[in-house]
Image (tube, rainbow, N blue to C red):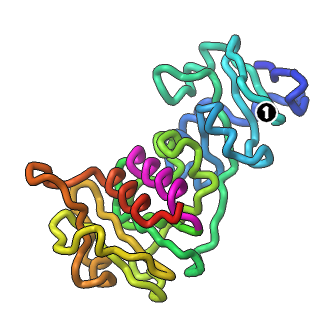
Amino acid sequence: MNQNMNQNSNIKLEALPYSYKTINRLGVSSDARAELGVYISDSAKHLQAVPAEDILCLIVREGSVIPFDFRVPIYTVSVAWFNRIKQTKHAQGILAIIRKPTWRLTAEYRYWVVCDTVQNPGNLGAIIRSVSAFLPNAILACCGGGSDAFHPDCVRASAGLVHGQPVVNLADNSLPLDRLWYALDPRGTHALNSLKQEKKLGIILGSEGHGIRESLHQHCQPVPIRIPTRPHVESLNVAVTAGIIAAHLSPV
Protein backbone atom coordinates (compact mmCIF):
# COMPACT_ATOMS: atom_id res chain seq x y z
CA MET A 1 0.00 0.00 0.00
CA ASN A 2 1.64 3.23 -1.14
CA GLN A 3 0.67 6.81 -0.72
CA ASN A 4 -0.07 8.61 -3.97
CA MET A 5 2.83 11.08 -4.09
CA ASN A 6 1.59 13.87 -6.32
CA GLN A 7 1.90 17.60 -5.88
CA ASN A 8 -1.44 17.73 -4.07
CA SER A 9 -0.33 15.36 -1.31
CA ASN A 10 1.33 16.02 1.99
CA ILE A 11 3.99 13.36 1.58
CA LYS A 12 4.14 10.83 4.38
CA LEU A 13 5.91 7.51 4.55
CA GLU A 14 3.79 5.74 7.15
CA ALA A 15 1.03 3.36 6.17
CA LEU A 16 -2.60 4.32 5.91
CA PRO A 17 -3.72 4.96 9.51
CA TYR A 18 -7.05 3.13 9.12
CA SER A 19 -7.55 -0.58 8.55
CA TYR A 20 -10.28 -1.74 6.19
CA LYS A 21 -12.13 -3.13 9.22
CA THR A 22 -12.14 0.29 10.87
CA ILE A 23 -13.33 1.95 7.67
CA ASN A 24 -16.14 -0.57 7.30
CA ARG A 25 -17.15 0.08 10.91
CA LEU A 26 -17.37 3.78 10.08
CA GLY A 27 -19.76 2.85 7.29
CA VAL A 28 -22.20 0.93 9.47
CA SER A 29 -21.77 2.06 13.08
CA SER A 30 -22.76 5.43 14.51
CA ASP A 31 -20.91 4.40 17.67
CA ALA A 32 -17.68 4.03 15.67
CA ARG A 33 -18.19 7.45 14.08
CA ALA A 34 -18.81 8.99 17.49
CA GLU A 35 -15.84 7.21 19.08
CA LEU A 36 -13.35 8.25 16.39
CA GLY A 37 -14.93 11.62 15.64
CA VAL A 38 -14.86 11.01 11.89
CA TYR A 39 -17.12 9.93 9.04
CA ILE A 40 -16.61 8.78 5.45
CA SER A 41 -17.68 10.13 2.07
CA ASP A 42 -17.27 8.48 -1.32
CA SER A 43 -18.10 11.39 -3.64
CA ALA A 44 -15.30 13.65 -4.86
CA LYS A 45 -17.80 16.30 -5.92
CA HIS A 46 -19.39 16.43 -2.48
CA LEU A 47 -15.97 16.91 -0.88
CA GLN A 48 -15.80 20.37 -2.41
CA ALA A 49 -18.20 21.47 0.35
CA VAL A 50 -15.74 20.32 3.05
CA PRO A 51 -12.83 22.51 4.26
CA ALA A 52 -9.50 20.88 3.42
CA GLU A 53 -8.41 20.94 7.06
CA ASP A 54 -11.31 18.62 7.93
CA ILE A 55 -10.41 16.01 5.29
CA LEU A 56 -7.97 13.77 7.13
CA CYS A 57 -7.06 11.71 4.06
CA LEU A 58 -8.26 10.38 0.72
CA ILE A 59 -8.12 6.70 -0.16
CA VAL A 60 -7.98 6.24 -3.93
CA ARG A 61 -8.43 3.06 -5.93
CA GLU A 62 -5.44 2.33 -8.15
CA GLY A 63 -6.09 3.70 -11.65
CA SER A 64 -8.82 6.13 -10.54
CA VAL A 65 -8.60 9.82 -11.40
CA ILE A 66 -8.98 12.47 -8.72
CA PRO A 67 -11.09 15.15 -10.45
CA PHE A 68 -10.30 18.03 -8.12
CA ASP A 69 -7.23 19.55 -6.50
CA PHE A 70 -7.27 18.16 -2.95
CA ARG A 71 -4.29 19.27 -0.89
CA VAL A 72 -4.61 16.48 1.64
CA PRO A 73 -2.82 13.17 2.27
CA ILE A 74 -3.73 10.78 -0.55
CA TYR A 75 -3.26 7.01 -0.35
CA THR A 76 -3.49 4.76 -3.40
CA VAL A 77 -4.66 1.21 -2.71
CA SER A 78 -5.17 -1.83 -4.89
CA VAL A 79 -8.52 -2.55 -6.53
CA ALA A 80 -8.97 -5.58 -4.28
CA TRP A 81 -8.27 -3.55 -1.12
CA PHE A 82 -10.60 -0.75 -2.21
CA ASN A 83 -13.36 -3.25 -2.93
CA ARG A 84 -13.25 -4.17 0.75
CA ILE A 85 -14.20 -0.65 1.80
CA LYS A 86 -16.37 0.72 -1.00
CA GLN A 87 -19.82 1.81 0.14
CA THR A 88 -21.72 1.42 -3.14
CA LYS A 89 -21.71 -1.08 -5.98
CA HIS A 90 -20.62 1.53 -8.53
CA ALA A 91 -18.05 3.35 -6.42
CA GLN A 92 -16.18 6.32 -7.89
CA GLY A 93 -12.85 4.98 -6.67
CA ILE A 94 -12.36 7.55 -3.93
CA LEU A 95 -13.18 7.55 -0.24
CA ALA A 96 -12.46 10.30 2.27
CA ILE A 97 -12.04 10.16 6.03
CA ILE A 98 -13.46 13.43 7.36
CA ARG A 99 -13.43 15.01 10.80
CA LYS A 100 -16.98 15.43 12.12
CA PRO A 101 -18.05 19.03 12.69
CA THR A 102 -19.46 20.03 16.06
CA TRP A 103 -22.31 22.48 16.56
CA ARG A 104 -23.45 24.33 19.64
CA LEU A 105 -27.01 23.62 20.72
CA THR A 106 -28.48 27.11 21.01
CA ALA A 107 -31.82 28.86 20.69
CA GLU A 108 -30.23 31.64 18.63
CA TYR A 109 -31.09 29.98 15.31
CA ARG A 110 -34.11 31.51 13.59
CA TYR A 111 -35.38 28.16 12.32
CA TRP A 112 -35.37 24.88 14.20
CA VAL A 113 -36.34 21.82 12.17
CA VAL A 114 -36.79 18.70 14.30
CA CYS A 115 -36.78 15.22 12.78
CA ASP A 116 -38.57 12.87 15.16
CA THR A 117 -37.40 9.24 14.76
CA VAL A 118 -36.71 9.63 11.02
CA GLN A 119 -35.10 6.25 10.37
CA ASN A 120 -34.14 6.34 6.70
CA PRO A 121 -30.71 7.99 6.24
CA GLY A 122 -31.53 8.90 2.65
CA ASN A 123 -34.60 10.82 3.82
CA LEU A 124 -32.60 12.58 6.52
CA GLY A 125 -29.93 13.55 3.99
CA ALA A 126 -32.55 14.99 1.64
CA ILE A 127 -34.03 17.00 4.52
CA ILE A 128 -30.58 18.38 5.35
CA ARG A 129 -30.14 19.38 1.71
CA SER A 130 -33.49 21.20 1.61
CA VAL A 131 -32.90 23.04 4.89
CA SER A 132 -29.45 24.11 3.69
CA ALA A 133 -30.88 25.24 0.34
CA PHE A 134 -33.80 27.32 1.60
CA LEU A 135 -33.46 28.31 5.25
CA PRO A 136 -30.63 30.58 6.40
CA ASN A 137 -29.74 30.54 10.08
CA ALA A 138 -31.36 27.14 10.61
CA ILE A 139 -30.46 24.15 12.75
CA LEU A 140 -31.72 20.61 12.23
CA ALA A 141 -32.22 18.45 15.32
CA CYS A 142 -32.63 14.66 15.37
CA CYS A 143 -34.41 12.96 18.25
CA GLY A 144 -36.08 9.70 19.17
CA GLY A 145 -33.28 7.41 18.03
CA GLY A 146 -33.56 8.12 14.30
CA SER A 147 -30.83 7.90 11.67
CA ASP A 148 -27.34 9.26 12.24
CA ALA A 149 -26.66 12.35 10.11
CA PHE A 150 -23.20 10.99 9.24
CA HIS A 151 -24.35 7.63 7.92
CA PRO A 152 -22.82 7.28 4.40
CA ASP A 153 -26.27 7.22 2.77
CA CYS A 154 -27.23 10.42 4.59
CA VAL A 155 -23.97 12.13 3.64
CA ARG A 156 -24.55 11.12 0.01
CA ALA A 157 -28.20 12.25 -0.04
CA SER A 158 -27.24 15.60 1.49
CA ALA A 159 -24.73 16.13 -1.36
CA GLY A 160 -22.07 16.67 1.31
CA LEU A 161 -23.98 19.61 2.82
CA VAL A 162 -24.21 17.79 6.16
CA HIS A 163 -20.73 19.13 6.91
CA GLY A 164 -21.82 22.77 6.79
CA GLN A 165 -25.45 22.51 7.91
CA PRO A 166 -25.77 22.50 11.71
CA VAL A 167 -27.22 19.14 12.81
CA VAL A 168 -27.50 18.06 16.45
CA ASN A 169 -29.06 15.30 18.53
CA LEU A 170 -31.82 16.44 20.85
CA ALA A 171 -33.65 15.19 23.93
CA ASP A 172 -37.44 15.46 23.80
CA ASN A 173 -37.50 17.97 26.65
CA SER A 174 -34.85 20.26 25.12
CA LEU A 175 -36.94 22.21 22.61
CA PRO A 176 -36.30 25.95 23.01
CA LEU A 177 -39.42 27.69 24.29
CA ASP A 178 -38.71 31.07 22.69
CA ARG A 179 -40.75 30.33 19.54
CA LEU A 180 -43.96 28.84 18.19
CA TRP A 181 -43.73 25.15 17.30
CA TYR A 182 -45.75 23.56 14.50
CA ALA A 183 -46.32 19.88 13.81
CA LEU A 184 -46.65 18.64 10.23
CA ASP A 185 -49.46 16.11 9.97
CA PRO A 186 -51.32 14.92 6.84
CA ARG A 187 -54.49 14.87 9.00
CA GLY A 188 -54.01 18.47 10.15
CA THR A 189 -56.82 20.96 9.64
CA HIS A 190 -54.68 24.03 8.87
CA ALA A 191 -53.29 24.28 5.34
CA LEU A 192 -49.70 25.20 4.60
CA ASN A 193 -50.49 28.82 3.73
CA SER A 194 -51.52 29.38 7.36
CA LEU A 195 -47.87 28.88 8.35
CA LYS A 196 -46.47 32.39 8.42
CA GLN A 197 -42.98 33.76 8.85
CA GLU A 198 -42.08 34.40 12.48
CA LYS A 199 -39.03 35.99 14.06
CA LYS A 200 -38.27 32.50 15.40
CA LEU A 201 -40.00 29.35 14.24
CA GLY A 202 -39.93 25.63 15.03
CA ILE A 203 -41.08 22.81 12.74
CA ILE A 204 -41.42 19.15 13.75
CA LEU A 205 -41.42 16.36 11.16
CA GLY A 206 -42.54 12.88 12.14
CA SER A 207 -41.15 9.48 11.25
CA GLU A 208 -42.06 7.70 8.04
CA GLY A 209 -44.31 5.16 9.74
CA HIS A 210 -45.60 6.61 13.00
CA GLY A 211 -45.60 10.38 12.71
CA ILE A 212 -44.75 12.66 15.63
CA ARG A 213 -44.63 11.23 19.14
CA GLU A 214 -46.93 12.71 21.78
CA SER A 215 -43.96 13.86 23.89
CA LEU A 216 -43.18 16.37 21.12
CA HIS A 217 -46.75 17.06 20.00
CA GLN A 218 -47.47 18.65 23.37
CA HIS A 219 -45.03 21.48 22.59
CA CYS A 220 -46.79 22.39 19.33
CA GLN A 221 -49.64 24.67 18.40
CA PRO A 222 -52.95 22.85 18.95
CA VAL A 223 -53.80 22.62 15.25
CA PRO A 224 -51.28 20.71 13.08
CA ILE A 225 -50.26 21.95 9.64
CA ARG A 226 -50.93 19.87 6.55
CA ILE A 227 -49.76 20.12 2.95
CA PRO A 228 -52.83 19.95 0.68
CA THR A 229 -52.75 17.09 -1.82
CA ARG A 230 -55.18 15.51 -4.23
CA PRO A 231 -57.71 13.24 -2.46
CA HIS A 232 -56.17 9.94 -3.55
CA VAL A 233 -52.78 10.80 -1.94
CA GLU A 234 -52.87 10.05 1.78
CA SER A 235 -49.49 11.52 2.73
CA LEU A 236 -46.11 12.63 1.42
CA ASN A 237 -42.65 11.26 2.07
CA VAL A 238 -41.07 13.10 5.02
CA ALA A 239 -38.20 14.41 2.88
CA VAL A 240 -40.64 15.76 0.28
CA THR A 241 -42.63 17.39 3.08
CA ALA A 242 -39.48 19.04 4.44
CA GLY A 243 -38.56 20.39 1.01
CA ILE A 244 -42.00 21.93 0.49
CA ILE A 245 -42.01 23.50 3.97
CA ALA A 246 -38.48 24.87 3.59
CA ALA A 247 -39.28 26.35 0.17
CA HIS A 248 -42.52 27.86 1.54
CA LEU A 249 -40.64 29.62 4.36
CA SER A 250 -37.61 30.54 2.28
CA PRO A 251 -36.63 34.20 1.93
CA VAL A 252 -34.64 33.25 -1.18
The residue under the point 46% across, 48% down is 125
Q: Secondary structure at mark 1?
A: loop
Instruction: Specify start and end residues of the magenta stretch as a single range.
Output: 121-136
**Residue 3 visible in the displayed image:** yes
Whether residue 85 is situated above or below residue 126 in the rendered picture? above
Q: Say which of 237 and 249 sits in front.
A: 249
Judged left or right of residue 11, residue 119 is: left
At label 1, counting other C-alpha atoms closer than 10 Å, the crowd grade (few under 14, some 14-19, many 20 or more) is some
- Residue extending farthest to the top is 63
Q: Horizontal and vertical percent for residue 47?
A: 66, 39
Whether residue 160 is situated above or below residue 44 in the rendered picture? below
Q: Horizontal and vertical percent for residue 17?
A: 75, 36
Q: In which quarter of the view is residue 71 placed?
A: top right
**Residue 22 visible in the displayed image:** no
Q: In which quarter of the view is residue 15 placed?
A: top right
Which residue position is annotated with label 1?
70
Q: Horizontal and vertical percent for residue 195?
A: 34, 74
Our reading of the magenta stretch's main secondary structure is helix
Q: Say which of 145 and 128 sits in front.
A: 128
Q: Say which of 204 and 74 sits in front.
A: 204
The number of numbered badges drawn on the structure is 1
Whether residue 119 is situated above or below residue 82 in the rendered picture? below
* Amino acid type for the residue under numbered disc 1: Phe
Give the quarter of the figure containing the N terminus: top right
- Residue extending farthest to the bottom is 178
The residue under the point 70% across, 14% down is 62
The residue under the point 79% across, 33% down is 70
The residue under the point 22% across, 55% down is 209
Judged left or right of residue 207, residue 135 is: right
